[in-house]
Image (cartoon, rainbow, N blue to C red):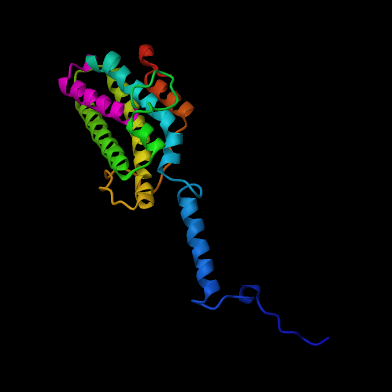
Amino acid sequence: MQNELVMPLWNARRPRMLSRNWWLRVGIVVLVTECLVLAGCGVHFASFISTAESDLPVIIQTVVNVLDSIAPQLNSSIVMSLGASTLATLKLLCGSPAPGAMQCDAASLVGEYHAAPTTTLLLKIQSALSAINANLNQIIGIVQGLVNVPQSVVLAIDGAFGIALTIINAILSLAPAAARALKVVLAPNPSDVPSTPTAPLTRAELVRRINAAFASFPKAQVQ
């Protein structure tokens, strides 16, 4: 038998660089990469917020319960003021869903964005989320610096608001993808927001973690 020259598989039908087939393959690679980054083709801010939306009513419950049952023990007017500001912004974002609700009110920013995504709504949502981010970070910093206060109170607020902050930042992390879809330039996200899209906790896991932080305060448990 005569020796035959065998072509390596990686050279077989290899498209010529810059040819039509070469650009097609490059395009496929880019598309697949973007799909992986966004956790699935077709994912945009509205569909992402659909999965994250069930978490927002839990965050509202968390802030309400902290203000009603835990924060007053700190005797800190600035914490109460920042907490009230955070709650007002959350209600602008998601409305006033009842405890245990799985979605935001239709008249809220998130509800309106679901019905008809617009540049204006996206800008308002990013602004609201950024304001909540700033307030939660400030509250956590103040609480951690307080002295002569019950440690259980500090741990509860620090833990619960820290978890809430991760949800807010997860939603913010996808805003740039939504902005590209709407062809709008957003303001930079807060520095602690992940630079790549981050999936939020499931509602069940969020409730579990919040209630673990509130272990010493049964009246503050969320649904």
Q: Give the percent coordinates (x, y) of residue 83.
A: 24, 24
Residue ranking furthest to the left: 77
Q: Quadrant of residue 108?
A: top left
Q: Is residue 196 highlighted in magenta?
A: no
Instruction: Give the prevailing secondary structure in the magenta stretch.
Output: helix
Q: Is residue 91 highlighted in magenta?
A: yes
Q: How many marks?
A: 0
Could you tell me which quadrant the N terminus lies in?
bottom right
Residue displayed at 34% across by 43% down: 118
Residue ranking furthest to the front: 116
Q: Nearer the viewer, residue 161 or 111?
A: 111
Could you tell me which quadrant the C terminus lies in?
top left
What span is in magenta?
73-94
In screen coordinates, is 62 left or right of 80?
A: right
Asked if 44 appears above or below 6 in the picture, the reply is above
Residue ranking furthest to the right: 1
Q: Give the percent coordinates (x, y) of residue 39.
A: 49, 47
Residue displayed at 16% across by 20% down: 77
Q: Give the percent coordinates (x, y) of residue 109.
A: 33, 33
In screen coordinates, is 6 left or right of 40?
A: right
Q: Nearer the viewer, residue 179 or 60?
A: 179
